[in-house]
Image (tube, helix red, strand yellow):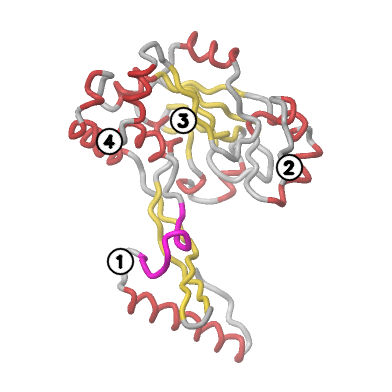
Amino acid sequence: MPQQLLDAQAQKVRDSLHAALIQWARSAGEGSDYTANVPMQCLHPVGHWYEVSNLLRNGTLMRLLQMRPQLAYLMVHNIDTAGANVDPSILGYHIHSGGALTTEVIARHLEDRGGGLARVDGRVRLIEGLALPNEEMESRLRYYNSATYWIDIDGLLKAFGLTRETLNDEARVDQAVRVMAAQMPTYITLKDVKRRWGKGQEDIFPVAQFEKLWGDMTALPELDCRFLLVPRARGQQLKEPAQLDAWLRDGSAAYTESLCAWRSIPA
C-alpha cells in the first residue's frame, strides 16, 4: 500500500528492509511452499472450512456413525468461543426449523472483527470481513458470527453429494470435498514466519497463506440455513489477552464458569 515518505535516514532503513524481503522471496522461490524451518515455527491454521470437511475425508464421521447410527446432529464451534455449550433448547430450535445448518450470531460490538450477517443478492448469509470492500461496511453489519454451528448430518452430506452409505468410498468422498471446495471462495492472508539460523539468530518474514472459511457455506443455495441470535456471553469470542478485562466485566467470565464444575490440579 502507498506509504508516507519518512525523513532521509528512516526512509533508507525502510527501503533497505523492503529490498531484503524482496531478495529473500526471490532466493526462497517466489510462490513456493515455505519449508525453511521446523514445522511448529511456521504453522498457521488454513481456515476452519477444512475442519468439518476433514471429518469426511479422514473417516472420523463414518466411524462415529458406525458407533452411533442414531446420531443426526453435530455442534461445531471455535475453541475461542468460550461460552459455547450443547444447549438443548437451541438444538430443539434447530431440529424444529428443519434447516441443514443453524448459525448462532450475537449483537455486534465495535471491537468485533470478522464475519457478520448480511443480505447478499436477496439471500441472508454470513459474509467475511475479508470479502467486503472496506472496514466501514463491515462495521455496519448488526450481527456478528459467533462461529457456532448446528449441523444436520444428512443435510450436510446431501449438499456434498454424499450419503451415510457412501462415506466408506474414499475416492468418492475426496472428489466430493474437492468439488465443494471449488465453490468456496479462497482468501489470501499475510502471516509471519520465523527462520532460525547461525547461533540462535532469528529472522521474521511475511508469507502469503490461502484460507477457506466455514461461514461461506451459508451462501450455497442447496444448503438450507438458519440464524439464531444468542446472548453475547454465549457467543463472544476470546481471541487475545487484551479482551480479558471486558470479558470479565460484562459477565462472560461468570457465565462460562457457571457451565461446569472446575477443579484445580496440583502442579
| Disc 1 residue type (three-letter) | Ser
- Of labels 4 and 1, earlier in sequence is 1
- Of labels 3 and 2, earlier in sequence is 3
183 versus 151 height, above or below: below
Circle 1 crowding by C-alpha within 10 Å: few under 14, some 14–19, many from 20 = few
* Residue carrying label 2: 266
* Residue carrying label 4: 177
Residue drawn at point x = 36 percent, y = 44 percent: 185
CA gap, disc 3 to disc 4? Answer: 21 Å
CA gap, disc 2 to disc 4? Answer: 45 Å
Mark 2: secondary structure: loop
Relative to 14, 82 lies left or right: right
Confirm or deny contact between disc 1 and disc 3 (CB under 8 A): no
Circle 4 crowding by C-alpha within 10 Å: few under 14, some 14–19, many from 20 = some
Circle 2 crowding by C-alpha within 10 Å: few under 14, some 14–19, many from 20 = few
123 versus 140 height, above or below: above
- Of labels 2 and 1, earlier in sequence is 1
**Residue 85 quadrant:** top right
Confirm or deny contact between disc 3 and disc 2 (CB under 8 A): no
* Residue carrying label 3: 125
| Disc 4 residue type (three-letter) | Val
